[in-house]
Amino acid sequence: MVKYELVMASTASASPRSQRTRAALIAAGLDLLVDRPIDAIPIDDLVARAGVAKGSFFNHFADKYDFAAAVAAEVRMEVEAAVAQANAGVSDPVIRIAGGMAVATRFAVDQPRRMMVLLRSQVPATSLTHPLNRGLKEDIEAALAEGLLHPEARTVGLLYWLGLCQILMAHLIETRPPRDIAAERFREMLLLGLAGLGVPMARAEDISRIVVLAGND
């Protein structure tokens, strides 16, 4: 967490020129990582697409993998911001957990190219201490405190839920189903996912009628 926050702080305090260079590199990564994994993208291609000098790349990133993680983090932060907005005013932690999956699903359906960039990341953020997992971690802890989940969710609930979301997003990007079919796949995954966390099926079915692909209203 400390390393990530230091990177964010240093970016915020960088000169406008440095920020523009980094933004151009990130934009290039968002384009190139849609079609190729980072191993297949030479740094020369990245800087050429960004229109910056090759030396500028290493002023911002240690290597290609550091770069790929930064690009993926940009997309993940966009998703997390949408999750926070969707869950604003929602107090039930289980509904908040479900709302996060709904947002991720909508993102995969509506912005498959950007989601592909996130899925191509070779540095998945799965640790309990990763700052981008803070919201989900807090929702799981709140649900546990209310006795709503299996005790095992304390150690592997976050990993389990992130895995479900990731495989659902990958499936939707691969198959590109009509929205009504995507909504049904989401409902089915949500039901099984909540049941796996320890939510009674009747309660899971109620939540599936509240949290739908069209929105978390």
Image (tube, grey):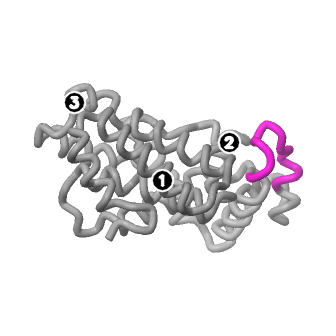
Numbered label attached to residue 121:
none
Is there any visible trace of residue 167 in the rendered image?
yes
In the rendered image, which residue does mark 1 sit on? Answer: 184
Secondary element at tag 1? helix
In the rendered image, which residue does mark 3 sit on? Answer: 150
Q: CA distance from mark 2 to mark 1?
A: 42 Å
Q: CA distance from mark 1 to mark 3?
A: 26 Å
Q: Residue furthest bottom?
A: 16
Q: Is residue 169 left or right of residue 46?
A: left
Secondary element at tag 3? loop
In the rendered image, which residue does mark 2 sit on? Answer: 62
Disc 3 crowd, CA 10 A, few/some/many (<14, 14-19, 20+): some
Query: What amino acid type should be assigned to the residue bearing mark 2?
Result: Ala
Mark 1 / mark 3, whichever is N-terminal: 3
Q: Residue furthest left?
A: 146
Query: What amino acid type should be assigned to the residue bearing mark 1?
Result: Glu
Q: Position of residue 190 (x, y in %)?
A: 38, 46
Highlighted range, magenta = 34-46
Point 87% across, 52% down: residue? 45
User: Does 43 lie within the magenta span?
Assistant: yes
Mark 2 / mark 3, whichever is N-terminal: 2
Q: Is residue 87 left or right of residue 141?
A: right
Q: Is residue 66 left or right of residue 160?
A: right
Is there any visible trace of residue 8 in the rendered image?
no
Q: Nearer the viewer, mark 1 or mark 3?
A: 1
Q: Position of residue 31 (x, y in %)?
A: 76, 59
Query: What amino acid type should be assigned to the residue bearing mark 3?
Result: His
Q: Looking at the image, is 75 positioned above or below residue 192?
A: below
User: Does 190 lie within the magenta span?
Assistant: no
Disc 2 crowd, CA 10 A, few/some/many (<14, 14-19, 20+): few
